[in-house]
Amino acid sequence: MNALPILLVGGAALFVIGGKRGGGDREIADAPAGSGDVVVYTATWCGACQSLKEGLEKAGIPFSEKDVDTDSKAAEFVKSSGGMIPVTTVNGKTFVGGNKLAAIKAALP
């Protein structure tokens, strides 16, 4: 998969999947409904993804991963969410960007 690095204000690096540029670090209302499980859409080469996962681990928030390089359905979901990783879903909400730990915590049941 092709990824283009994008540098956002504040120095947070996000990556575009499939060359589509989204609207930046944001929350999207249309996420798959869930039971409160945290799912991080990621790639092994994504530094922002690694940082988010480390933050979740330090906060004691369990999560599962979907690798956009090996899971075509995960890649399609990321594309439909603006094309940038990391993407995190929790309780029917989707958060795009690596600096969403506070918002993810707030969305937990």
Image: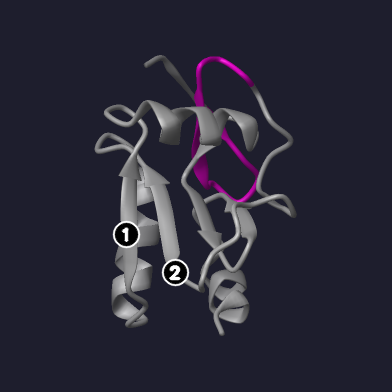
> Which element type, helix, strand or loop, lies under badge 2?
loop
Which residues fall within the magenta stretch?
Answer: 6-20
Label 2 sits on residue: 37
Q: For the residue marked with disc 2, what is the amino acid?
A: Asp
Q: From the viewer's perspective, is residue 63 above or below residue 58?
A: above
Is residue 74 something that shows in the picture? yes
Instruction: Give residue 55's quadrant in the image.
Output: bottom left
Instruction: Give residue 107's quadrant in the image.
Output: bottom right
Q: Residue at x 55, y 79 (%)?
A: 108
> Which element type, helix, strand or loop, lies under badge 1?
strand
Instruction: Report the side of 60 relative to 28 (left or right).
Output: left
> In the rendering, at what x and y percent does residue 78 appear?
53, 35
> In the rendering, at what x and y percent does residue 88 appear?
50, 55
Instruction: Report the side of 52 relative to 80 (left or right).
Output: left
Q: From the viewer's perspective, is residue 92 above or below residue 21?
A: below
Between residue 94 and residue 103, name the one nearer to us: 94
Between residue 103 and residue 69, name the one nearer to us: 69
Between residue 32 and residue 98, name the one nearer to us: 32
Q: For the residue marked with disc 1, what is the amino acid?
A: Ser
Spatial CA span between label 2 and label 1: 8 Å
Mark 2 or 1, nearer chain start: 2
Q: Residues within 10 Å of mark 1 (few under 14, many from 20)?
A: few
Instruction: Report the side of 24 relative to 85 (left or right).
Output: right
**Is there a contact, CB below 8 Å, between mark 2 and mark 1?**
yes
Between residue 35 and residue 95, name the one nearer to us: 35
Quadrant where the image shows the N terminus: top left
Please tell me how many numbered marks the rendered image carries: 2
Is residue 50 something that shows in the picture? no
Q: From the viewer's perspective, is residue 109 above or below residue 56?
A: below
Label 1 sits on residue: 64
